[in-house]
Image (cartoon, grey):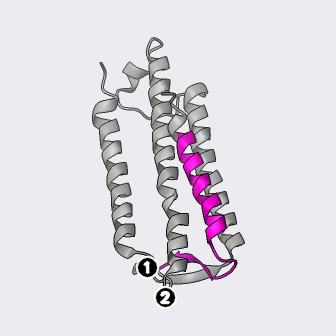
Amino acid sequence: MRPWFPLLAGSVFYAFALVWAAGELPDDGVPLHFDPTGAPTAFGSRTRFLTLGTLFGLLVAGIGAGLHRLVTTGSLTRISVPHREYWTAPQRVGRLRHMLAEDMGRIFGGTLLLLTAVPVTAVYATRVQPPRLPVGPVWVVLALLVAGIVGYCVYLARYRYRPA
């Protein structure tokens, strides 16, 4: 699999979720922000929700694509990696760039995939009275996100970049 594929897949899923939400959300009264109990604290129009969602998605995808490009073609002098001397040896730089590109694709693709929950939960919140999020599933998703990121970072630091 190409290193950029997870980023592309996450972007496509997120874009699909926004397009789907565009057809499901009401014109007005769309929850834009929620408190920890799942109650909406701010409302706006469908256009505002989709504009903010699009801008945020483009920002995440753009940062992911930019970092992917940086690690595949840019200077590695500012890149921090365990066992730097080993990985920056001329015979291993290609492998290092590939591994870093895979990591950028996975991290940002996974983030965009997780963000597909935002339009889905916004549609859900507009269909229940009073409008609110399903708090349990939302906290479970957030906990899984944090655990996944921490676990992946530990894996990267302790195992992935160990000299062969």
Q: Is residue 21 magenta?
A: yes
Placement of the C terminus among the 4 image quadrants: top left
Mark 1 neighbour class, 10 Å CA radius: few under 14, some 14 to 19, many 20 or more: some
Location of mark 2 (residue): 130
The Cα atoms of the two marked residues, 1 and 2, are separated by 11 Å
Figure check: 138 above or below 38? above
Which residue is outermost to the bottom?
130
Q: Which mark is residue 38?
A: 1
Q: Give residue 80's position: percent from left, percent from top.
A: 44, 35
Q: Picture coordinates of residue 92 (x, y %)?
A: 43, 16
Q: Is residue 47 left or right of residue 91?
A: right
Amino acid at dot 2: Pro
Q: Residue at x 66, y 58 (%)?
A: 54
Q: Position of residue 14 (x, y in %)?
A: 57, 53
User: Where is residue 134, by image quadrant?
Assistant: bottom left
Q: Relative to the observer, which residue lies in front, 82 or 100?
A: 100
Give the image location of residue 141, x and y in percent.
Answer: 38, 61
Disc 1 residue type? Gly
163 or 56: nearer the viewer = 56
Q: Taken as a whole, is the magenta stretch helix, strand or loop?
A: helix
Q: Please, what secondary structure does the residue beneath circle 1 have? A: loop
Of circles 1 and 2, the one toward us is: 2
Secondary element under disc 2, as helix, strand or loop, is loop
- In percent of the image, x 55 and y 65: which residue is there? 119
Residue for point 56% across, 35% down? 68
Range shown magenta: 7-35
| Relative height, residue 45 to residue 115 (above, below) | below
